[in-house]
Image (tube, grey):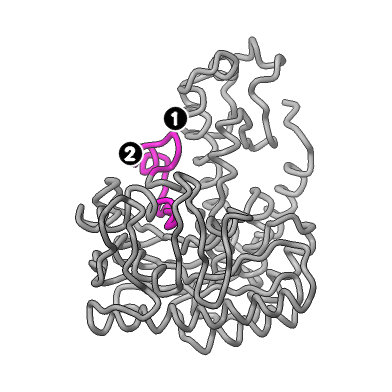
Amino acid sequence: MSSTFSFRVLTTDGAARRGEMTTAHGVVQTPAFMAVGTRGAVKGLTPRDLVGEGAEIILGNTYHLWLRPGDGLIARQGGLHRFIGWNRPILTDSGGFQAFSLGARRRISEEGIRFRSHLDGSEHLLTPEGAVDIQAQLGSDIAMVLDECLAQPASYDTVRESTERTARWARRCRERFLQLQDTGYGVGPHFPRQASPAGNKVRPHIPIITNPGQAQFGIIQGGTDPELRTLSVERSLALGFEAYAIGGLSVGEPADTMCSVVEHTARQLPVDRLRYLMGVGTPLNLVEAVARGIDLFDCVMPTRNARNGQLFTSHGRLTIKNAQYAEDARPPDLNCACYTCSNFSRAYLRHLCVVGEMTGAILNTVHNVRFYLDTMARIREAIVFGCLGSLQQSLRSTFSRPLCDS
């Protein structure tokens, strides 16, 4: 395990764990939620806003930062933390999902993912080794391996082939990561010289390691098939990652299927390693996954929904543009102490939404991010007091209603 990364379980409530994750840039209380900073910023929020609302860790998008402004430029600026003015922990994804989402503009082979940029159509190759090098230059505290993201539904044979390729890519990622840790530099055979997405003449042969304390997480794939999930767990555990993520969910499968896969997978992972469920989800998803042993989450839902005028509240989801709030002097959530709820009314937020004022999206985002962080704090407290089941029932009741009517 990385000398600066650690995880410890402090207490449990059934399968749920209350813990602490220590990184080179600070400690994160778990279970935790990461706001998504796709291009080096959480949309609508400054680092000061995030700290003020209690964020301890954010997520950065490797694919977008690689293409623009470029990992080399960020490395020369001292790494991602310094570049974006955030001195707390950062996790970066590998870029695989974003490359996969390009559809017909990408091809997946054993070598990696060859794709055409959504920015200018230029061709690029993202290999497992390349994903490691890019994240070494970004200097995140946690780097993810490159995995193959599979469209669903898919046949058993297709999912098995994808799962095995992900395992082979994971081995290459781990070997490259350990090589960089051992030597501080090096060039793998699968990281060729090529035109830089940021416009530099060539990619550097020797990556700049901006965070020697970086940890690397493996990713469990396997679709919804229990046998393939177990196979992926076995292959990943053999590589000895600092922690393990569960990928390939929240892609349209029923909620009970997702819960079943999470439970099946989590109970096979080491009790002393952090478990990260990628890309999930609603407040109800979070508590259901925590009850099945998950420690870390990310999702664009709180920020994306905020920009579209939907707020998460202790009474359920609230669509602020609705006419019923035109003269509503109450804050969005009487039980919330965020900057937005402490200072502004539903009527004002609706006005901002109706006229298209960007301040409305910012204030909505402040609230939604705070609501998610407060929900995680409630979950942690419930685990400590052994009453997570009661909180589950409460959130099931609150978020089973389609809209807030109060």
Range shown magenta: 41-64
Question: Residue at position x 74%, y 62% from top?
Answer: 152
- Residue linked to disc 1: 339
Instruction: Looking at the image, tell me whether mark 2 or mark 1 is earlier in sequence order.
Output: 2
- From what the image shows, is residue 392 above or below residue 310? below
Amino acid at circle 1 = Tyr
**Mark seen at residue 211:** none
Q: Which residue is depicted at the point 31% across and 69% down?
A: 193
Name the amino acid type tagged 2. Answer: Arg
Q: Quadrant of the N terminus?
A: bottom left
Q: Which mark is residue 48?
A: 2
Q: Which residue is more in the foreground, 363 or 361?
A: 361
Q: Secondary structure at mark 1?
A: helix
Residue 197 part of the magenta-drawn span: no
Residue placed most toward the observer, 189 or 122: 122
Task: Say if mark 2 contacts mark 1, CB within 8 Å.
Answer: no
Tell us which disc is closer to us: 2 or 1.
2
Q: Residue at x 60, y 87 (%)?
A: 234
Q: CA distance from mark 2 to mark 1?
A: 12 Å
The image shows residue 286 at horizontal and vertical percentages of: 63, 55
Left/right placement of residue 328 relative to residue 210 reads: right
Q: Which of 320/30 is in front? A: 320
Q: Secondary structure at mark 2?
A: helix
**Residue at (55, 78) in percent of width and height:** 110
